[in-house]
């Protein structure tokens, strides 16, 4: 009996089988994909927050210009590099992946990907769809009256060239 047990001891295996290793690799792969999926959502939220911050800064910059000159420059939305407001708008558009090749649309729009800025010497309105997933429309709007927030979908009809609300 002792000779049989010594034979079994000699032939006992050490290490992991191929199946065990494949199971471990599969589990690690599943955990990694779950982690990457959650990071993607966080990245999109960060981009939206950055764009929202740029648009809020736009309102502050426009008010600074009004304080300095007594009124808003008529080209506040259309001329890049002159007064900083268009540059802030373009920064928000770039963050969200929108084109900055042309001046922002002056036409009020509340659809997926909408971004517009319209101004006169007394007022301005700038708004942008900050939901970059494309599944919803989330219009963040700022105006010269001090409004700076996401407009609920029930309020989209109230956004015009003079005000967000």
Image (cartoon, rainbow, N blue to C red):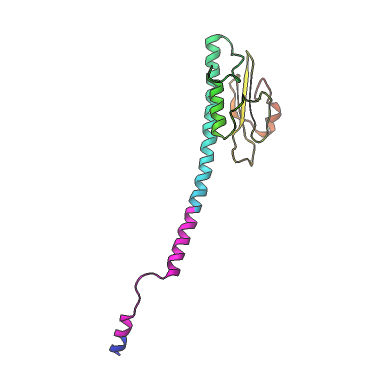
In the figure, is residue 27 to the left or right of 143? left
User: What range of the chain is rendered magenta?
Assistant: 6-32
Which quarter of the image is occupied by the C terminus? Answer: top right
Return the residue found at the far bottom: 1
Residue 18 covered by magenta stretch: yes
Quarter residue 123 falls in = top right
Return the residue found at the far front: 101
| Towards the viewer: 112 or 158 | 112
| Towards the viewer: 161 or 82 | 82
User: How far from the left and from the top, in percent, is residue 133?
Assistant: 60, 41
User: How far from the left and from the top, in percent, is residue 78?
Assistant: 61, 20
| Towards the viewer: 165 or 18 | 18
Q: What residue is shown at x 34% (from left), y 73% (from top)?
A: 14
* Residue 70 vertical position relative to residue 61 in the rendered view, above or below: above
Q: What residue is shown at x 54% (from left), y 33% (from top)?
A: 95
Identify the main secondary structure in magenta. helix
């Amino acid at each position: 009996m002792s000779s049989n047990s010594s034979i079994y001891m000699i032939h006992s295996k050490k290490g992991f089988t191929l199946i065990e290793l494949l199971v471990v690799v599969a589990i690690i792969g599943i955990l990694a994909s779950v982690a990457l999926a959650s990071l993607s959502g966080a990245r999109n939220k960060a981009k939206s927050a950055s764009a929202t911050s740029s648009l809020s800064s736009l309102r502050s910059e426009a008010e600074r210009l009004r304080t300095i000159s007594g009124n808003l420059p008529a080209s506040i939305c259309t001329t890049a590099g002159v007064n900083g407001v268009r540059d802030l708008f373009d920064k928000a558009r770039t963050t969200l992946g929108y084109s900055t090749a042309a001046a922002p649309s002056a036409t009020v729009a509340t659809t997926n990907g909408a971004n517009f800025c319209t101004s006169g010497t007394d007022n301005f309105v700038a708004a942008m769809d900050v939901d970059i997933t494309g599944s919803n429309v989330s219009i963040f709007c700022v105006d010269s009256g001090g409004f700076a927030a996401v407009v609920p979908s029930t309020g989209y009809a109230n956004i015009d060239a003079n005000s967000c609300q």
